[in-house]
Image (cartoon, rainbow, N blue to C red):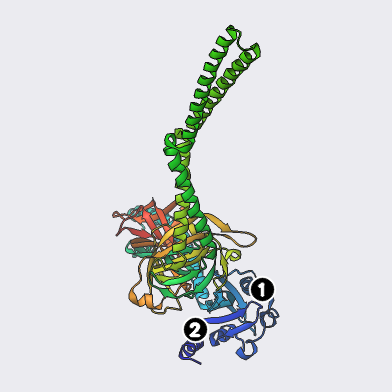
């Protein structure tokens, strides 16, 4: 065992949390001592057996625990934190906090199984229940005290009436005694026990709570995988086969390093055709641009000149034939032949002039513009192919780590020697590790607590002792999932803009990270015990003891609530005195 494996084994053996790993067939491959202690199971009888053999035959009360594990293995429902009850062998009940995540391979980053981390929070839950029970008892005690105070008040009123009546009786008695005395009766020697004692109240004084400020923070725990803060995707410049591969995924490279060499045999054929097309387009454009001085226009002009000369010659012949015919020297058919020849020459001249006009129209501005555009297209095509030829040696466009591009599974391309790639196919990506981003999912219950710009801290088992600081960069406005018993979740992106040199040496792309998002931070919050706040008819009220010892019911606005206290946003000030209900 190498030192790193020995270190990892020692960490697992000494963890206070239970760790259990299962492969995708449900077989238990890891079960640390803490897991055995928490679940009260023998490690030697657990490892190597299937989850069904060990746990499904236990108490039916463990169905919730079993379902969470089975969902993680067979439905890929990982990344959730659950609180479930577990009945240990022997009947003892425990409350577990259970978290699941993928166990991935080191080479292909494929899921190899599921790892479950759980801790015994039975004592914490018991304390919380005791605290709630104590709060309820305290509330009932205060209610009883109020009732006792009311009864005592009634008793005091009745005692006061009795005292007044007793006083009147004593007065009447002394008046009667005086009358008897003056009438000669023997006076009484003593009168004792005629005054009733005043009642004494034993009710305790009300408890007074003085409002003070204290810090209040709240966080949301998430998990995700570390990715480069920015990725530059390198695509195939043309259709080709791979001749050479000079990198492996995960390797750090510098700008300009050779990554791939592509076969250019097919591209060379296209390049020669593009050069020939460019030459032809240039010749055509040059010809149309100087069309009036071109060969076709010269031929058309010569054809018109020949037709004009022939017509002129035929007209002279017709004049001679008319003169000879008038003198009777030639027959009429020769004159008719001369006339027909002039008519034919006239038709030829018209056709030649029309052909000249048609030929001249070939050099009009529209055709010149078309030839110019065809030349531009040919030059653009040639430039594009020359640029592709220059990219046959694929170089790193920036310094970073070579990672696989984010594409669908069925669209991943092999980069082995001889593999064929098509134009535009994503070959690889260069990740900028000067910063990081973490993609995570948040359920619909917590998504309303998040906001862009909130502070985030990231820690991970793979980089112990390091704490990374980041911000919430993006919150999706559309939910994903939400089918069946799974709640909808929202995609959230966390950005860690900078890494110090120590972190750059340790951090690797794809490491898992535990995130803490600070969703509430009030360093001077006004916190009150829950017993001091009561809701009546849609109003939240407290009892304020005024300077004149009078009690005033005052409406307040509340904020965040914890297990034992509530934040007051308005309605109270520091040093205000409150009494219980």
Q: In which quarter of the view is residue 419 placed?
A: bottom right
Closer-to-camera residue (205/199): 205
Closer-to-camera residue (521/501): 501
Count of numbered circles on the image: 2
- Residue behind mark 1: 63
Mark 2 nearby-residue class (10 Å; few <14, some 14–19, many ≥20): some
**Dot 1 or dot 2, earlier in sequence:** 2
From what the image shows, is residue 250 above or below residue 565? below
From what the image shows, is residue 363 above or below residue 101? above
Secondary structure beneath label 2: loop
Q: Measuring from the top left, give residue 415's x and y in whole percent.
A: 54, 71
Any mark on residue 444, and which? none
Q: Residue at x 55, y 78 (%)?
A: 105
Q: Residue at x 46, y 62 (%)?
A: 389
Q: Is residue 385 left or right of residue 398?
A: right
Q: Measuring from the top left, give residue 269's x and y in whole percent.
A: 53, 60
Q: Measuring from the top left, give residue 71's x and y in whole percent.
A: 63, 70
- Residue behind mark 2: 16
Q: Residue at x 35, y 77 (%)?
A: 502
Q: In which quarter of the view is residue 322 placed?
A: top right
Tag 1 and tag 2, C-beta contact below 8 Å: no
Secondary structure beneath label 1: helix
From what the image shows, is residue 361 above or below residue 500? above
In this rendering, does residue 537 appear at all? Answer: no
The residue sitting at the bottom extreme is 1
In this rendering, does residue 526 appear at all? Answer: yes
Q: Residue at x 56, y 15 (%)?
A: 318
Q: Is residue 207 left or right of residue 263?
A: left
Mark 1 nearby-residue class (10 Å; few <14, some 14–19, many ≥20): some
């Amino acid at each position: 065992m190498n030192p790193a494996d020995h270190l990892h084994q020692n960490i697992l053996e000494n963890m206070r949390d239970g760790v259990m790993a299962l492969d995708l067939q449900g077989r238990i491959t890891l079960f640390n001592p803490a897991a055995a202690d928490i679940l009260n199971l023998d490690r030697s009888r657990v490892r190597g057996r299937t989850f069904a053999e060990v746990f499904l035959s236990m108490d039916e009360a463990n169905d919730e625990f079993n379902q969470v594990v089975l969902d993680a293995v067979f439905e890929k429902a990982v990344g959730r934190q659950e609180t479930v009850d577990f009945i240990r062998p022997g009947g003892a009940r425990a409350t577990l906090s259970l978290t699941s995540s993928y166990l991935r391979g080191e080479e292909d980053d494929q899921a190899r199984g599921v790892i479950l981390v759980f801790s015994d929070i039975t004592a914490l839950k018991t304390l919380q229940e005791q605290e709630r029970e104590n709060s309820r008892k305290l509330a009932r005690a205060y209610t009883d005290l109020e009732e006792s105070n009311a009864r005592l008040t009634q008793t005091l009123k009745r005692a006061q009436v009795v005292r007044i009546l007793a006083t009147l009786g004593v007065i009447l008695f002394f008046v009667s005694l005086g009358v008897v005395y003056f009438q000669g009766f023997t006076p009484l020697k003593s009168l004792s026990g005629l005054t009733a004692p005043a009642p004494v109240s034993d009710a305790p004084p009300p408890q007074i709570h003085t409002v003070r400020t204290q810090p209040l923070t709240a966080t949301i725990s998430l998990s995700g995988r570390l990715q480069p803060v920015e990725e530059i995707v390198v695509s195939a410049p043309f259709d080709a086969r791979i001749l050479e591969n000079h990198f492996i995924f995960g390797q750090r490279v510098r700008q300009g390093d050779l990554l791939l060499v592509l076969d250019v045999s097919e591209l060379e054929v296209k390049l020669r055709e593009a050069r020939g097309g460019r030459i032809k387009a240039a010749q055509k454009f040059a010809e149309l641009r100087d069309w009036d001085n071109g060969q076709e226009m010269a031929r058309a002009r010569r054809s018109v000149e020949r037709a004009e000369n022939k017509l002129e010659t035929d007209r002279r012949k017709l004049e001679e034939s008319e003169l000879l015919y008038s003198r009777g020297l030639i027959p009429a058919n020769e004159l008719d032949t001369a006339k027909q020849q002039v008519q034919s020459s006239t038709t030829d001249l018209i056709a030649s002039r029309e052909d000249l006009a048609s030929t001249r129209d070939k050099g009009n501005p529209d055709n010149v513009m078309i030839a110019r555009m065809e030349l531009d297209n040919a030059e653009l095509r040639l430039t594009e192919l020359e640029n592709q030829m220059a990219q046959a040696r694929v170089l790193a466009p920036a310094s970073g780590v070579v990672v696989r591009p984010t594409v669908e599974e069925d669209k991943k391309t092999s980069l082995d020697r001889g593999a064929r790639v098509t134009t535009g196919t994503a070959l690889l990506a260069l990740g900028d590790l000067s910063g990081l981003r973490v993609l995570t999912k948040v359920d619909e219950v917590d998504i309303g607590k998040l906001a862009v710009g909130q502070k985030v801290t990231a820690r991970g088992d793979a980089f112990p002792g390091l704490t990374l600081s980041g911000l919430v960069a993006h919150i999706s406005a559309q939910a994903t999932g939400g089918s069946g018993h799974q709640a909808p979740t929202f995609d959230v992106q966390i950005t860690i803009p900078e890494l110090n040199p120590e972190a750059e040496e340790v951090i690797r792309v794809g490491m898992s990270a535990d995130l803490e998002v600070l969703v509430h931070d009030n360093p001077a919050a006004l916190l009150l015990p829950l017993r001091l706040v009561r809701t009546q008819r849609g109003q939240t009220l407290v009892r304020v003891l005024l300077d004149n010892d009078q009690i005033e019911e005052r409406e307040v606005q509340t904020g965040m609530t914890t297990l034992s206290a509530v934040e007051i946003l308005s309605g109270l000030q520091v040093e205000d005195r409150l009494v219980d209900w």
